[in-house]
Image (cartoon, rainbow, N blue to C red):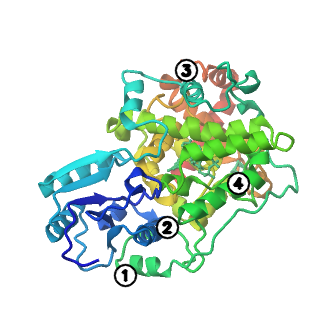
Amino acid sequence: MPATKKHSTIRLILGDQLNPLHPWFDEQRDNVLYTLMEIRPENEYVTHHIQKITGIFAAMRRFAGHLESEGHHVHYFRITDPENLHQFGGNLEMLAKKHHAERIEIQEPDEYRLDEVLKRALEQTGLEWSATNSAHFYTDRSELADMFRNKKSFLMETFYRNMRKKHNVLMEPDGTPVTGRWNYDAENRNKLPKGHIPPPPLVFSHNTEAEYNDICKAQLPHFGEIKPKAFPWPLNRKEALEVLRHFLEYLLPHFGTFQDALSDEHPFVYHSRLSFAMNLKMIGPAEVVQATEEHWKAHPDSISLSQAEGFIRQILGWREYMRGIYWAKMPEFSQLNFFGHSRPLPDFYWTGDTPMRCVSKAIRQSLDYGYAHHIQRLMVTGNFALLAGSHPDEVDKWYLGIYVDAFDWVEITNTRGMSQFADGGIVGTKPYVSSGSYIHKMGDHCRNCRYNPKESIGPKACPFNSLYWHFLERHREKLENNPRMGMMYRVWDKMDGEKRMALLNQASDFIAAL
Ligand code: FAD
Ligand code: SF4
């Protein structure tokens, strides 16, 4: 593209807006210049997993290449380009001058912080600008904020049923849910049978040395493991569709059944591994949901409704619901700390170096793959961080950094809300805390652990057990009247006084030693 060519409009594409089906690309227009930017502050506001940065840069570069191959005009700022000013405003101004552009267009960012940054940057250019919908989610930003405005809590189940009706997903023509049941959650709580081996995940083997070397050259902070010559995540729409097909064919038949299972050997169990591709918008939630419903209908003998419903609920329900909470409650949500927790996150969150087998496995796996499934995030690392009294800011930073799929709009609502209950009950009706018995029930980690999930006091006692009671006791004032917690307080109150004291001491000693 000649440097002096006039483009009256510049369109900015963010690193998580890699949707080749966006209406922007319906027609090829010579007066439009697309731009993508690898910006230093965007990669430094928390320390990210190396696979996350590499994956986003690699997907952005391939997306720019795809647009050019379709005849669009593109200016790409690499992290190491000398002309890159590492500010959206500065780079846009420079391009606007060079191409005599009169207006700038963006797709609405999903993140509150970035929304603010971009508004300032666009004002700085002095040019006319506008924002359009990213054409990805079922619901748009303002619709959700309106729905949640002035509500203390809005149940996910109510939201999910509305979404099912509105988008006619798993519905009968008369407006009732197929088979008459909305929710199969109760059937989705099995551990893997002994010796059961889930099908292997579909992993790619991309050469991402160029991106990795640039990240090292630019000295971007990072952590975690990577094999730059064998990068495993999908990097474009075609590959995202392959991951979806793989999921439907091999994993959906047991997804729901084992959705909550923890496994010492199989990190991905029956999970789809679609979140990275979906959050970068290489593939859309509606097409994933539709393909799942169609696949279930086409295979009634091998796929029960509980599998398809369990999966669809995560995307049509949880994913959209979390985004709704985010836009209704930000920026205040990011400051909430209901329990007033103040401890640092233990050092082993960066190494996995702890004798607690379940925690060590979840962290090691996160460092190796930038991935852990939902129950590992919620009931292992999240549960432990909450029981230990970690500051939600610390917990947020860790989750935002370590997962390849972590973006503020979905990370913070899950972490600060669902997992840490720092919102005091906006997302969930009670804290997701458990003793070792839940982890023991849902998987096989305990077999290989130094601790015993059935012991609560003494050197072999599972730390989750005493920490659980310690948590309940120290937050009694805040939780006792929660109708879903009352029963556990009654159990605690009936316990022998000496035992209670021993449990509290055991937990205090453990926390002090962290
Ligand atoms: P699957 O189990 O195959 O589920 C399918 C899809 O459903 C996922 O790809 C995801 O898009 C969606 N989904 C499932 N659960 C949720 C949920 N609770 N909220 C939103 N979408 C959901 N998800 C992210 O995408 N980014 C995050 O940063 C993130 N942080 C989390 C932090 C904590 C503490 C917890 C408890 C959960 C978090 N989740 C996050 C939700 C969930 O754990 C991941 O979406 C999921 O593990 C991704 O793996 P998968 O694609 O194999 O999911
Ligand atoms: Fe985790 Fe406790 Fe089981 Fe060990 S015994 S794996 S710490 S739940």
For image coordinates 32% across by 78% down, the residue present is 80
Residue 59: percent from the left, percent from the top? 47, 67
Task: Name the mark on residue 321.
Answer: none
Mark 3 vs mark 1, foreground winner is: 1
Question: Distance of mark 4 from mark 2, alpha carbons?
Answer: 21 Å
SS category of the residue bearing label 3: loop
SS category of the residue bearing label 1: helix
**Callout 2–callout 1 Cβ contact below 8 Å:** no
Q: Which residue is mark 4?
A: 247
Q: Which residue is mark 3?
A: 482
Q: Which residue is mark 1?
A: 217
**What kind of residue is marked 4?**
Phe
Mark 1 vs mark 4, foreground winner is: 4
Question: Distance of mark 3 from mark 1, alpha carbons?
Answer: 52 Å
Q: Which residue is mark 2?
A: 55
Please indicate whether residue 361 sits to the left or right of residue 401 in the image. Answer: right
Q: Tell which of 160 and 356 is nearer to you.
A: 160
**What kind of residue is marked 3?**
Asn
**What kind of residue is marked 2?**
Gly
Residue 353: percent from the left, percent from the top? 60, 64
Q: Of marks 2 and 1, which one's residue comes earlier in the chain?
A: 2
Q: Quadrant of the N terminus?
A: bottom left
Q: Tell which of 198 and 171 is nearer to you.
A: 171
Q: Is mark 4 within 8 Å of ligand 1?
A: yes
For image coordinates 45% across by 39% down, the residue present is 323
Residue 190: percent from the left, percent from the top? 79, 41
